[in-house]
Image (cartoon, grey):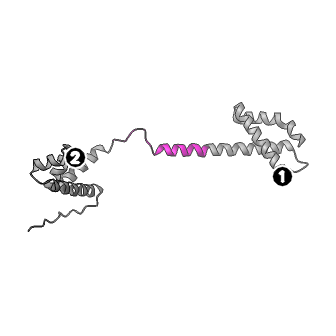
């Protein structure tokens, strides 16, 4: 164990060559000495202590590089899911889809939906404009939203709904 101290300058030179930075090299030497002390029983007497220490240092350094690469990959993967700008290529297609889906709504539902959402009218104003009760505005709006959602998701049946006649 007393022989470890005489190998520190060599370990520092090798660590500095590996890392290129003094503080990282010092940390690497410290990690190497710590591991050597905790696993000194694995060193075989008669073999070269400096080679054993340099092997430990090399393995620690390689493990640190691999860990840094994994961390960099994880960070980049996280960023890949969060684009800096919203993609706008599909906007025109989405507008066309919405326009087509609106055209498929019955007139009663479409008019309520457009007055409330596009024109930003209150339920009471919409009811007055269309000359229908407020409750009818709410039910038509609910049915229009559901049908529009189904049409846009592609889950709506293409057959028109049957009207109940009394």
Residue 58 on the magenta span: no
Which residue in the rendered view is the most extreme toward the bottom?
166
User: For the magenta stretch, what is the residue range?
Assistant: 69-88
In reply to whether residue 70 is colored magenta, the answer given is yes
Residue 160 position within the rendered picture, expressed as x and y whole percent measured from the top left: 17, 63
Q: Is residue 109 left or right of residue 24?
A: left
Secondary structure under the numbered disc 2 in the rendered image: helix
Q: In which quarter of the image is residue 4?
A: top right
User: Where residue 149 sits in the image (x, y, percent)?
Assistant: 27, 55
Give x and y (percent) for residue 101. Answer: 22, 53
Q: Is residue 82 left or right of residue 142?
A: right
Image marks 1 and 2: residues in contact by CB distance under 8 Å: no
Query: Which residue corresponds to mark 1?
Result: 42
Q: Judge whether 113 appears above or below 18 on screen.
A: below
Q: Which of marks 1 and 2 is nearer the N terminus?
A: 1
| Cα gap from disc 1 to disc 2, whole angstroms | 75 Å
Query: Residue 84 or 13: which is nearer the viewer?
Result: 84
Give coordinates of residue 78: x percent, y percent. Answer: 50, 45
Q: How many labels does the image show?
A: 2
Residue topped by disc 2: 117
- Could you say whether the residue bearing mark 1 is in a helix, strand or loop? helix
């Amino acid at each position: 164990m007393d022989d470890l101290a005489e190998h520190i300058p060599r370990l520092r030179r090798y660590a500095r060559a590996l890392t290129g930075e003094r503080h990282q090299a010092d940390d690497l030497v410290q990690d190497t000495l710590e591991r050597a002390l905790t696993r000194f029983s694995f060193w075989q007497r008669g073999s070269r202590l400096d080679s054993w220490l340099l092997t430990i240092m090399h393995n620690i350094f390689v493990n640190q590089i691999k860990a840094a690469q994994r961390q960099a990959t994880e960070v980049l993967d996280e960023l890949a899911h969060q684009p800096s700008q919203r993609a706008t290529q599909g906007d025109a297609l989405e507008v066309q889809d919405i326009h087509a889906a609106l055209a498929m709504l019955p007139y009663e539902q479409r008019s309520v939906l457009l007055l409330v959402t596009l024109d930003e009218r209150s339920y009471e104003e919409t009811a007055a404009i269309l000359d229908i009760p407020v409750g009818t505005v709410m039910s038509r709006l609910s049915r229009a939203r559901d049908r529009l959602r189904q049409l846009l998701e592609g889950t709506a049946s293409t057959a028109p709904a049957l009207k109940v006649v009394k």
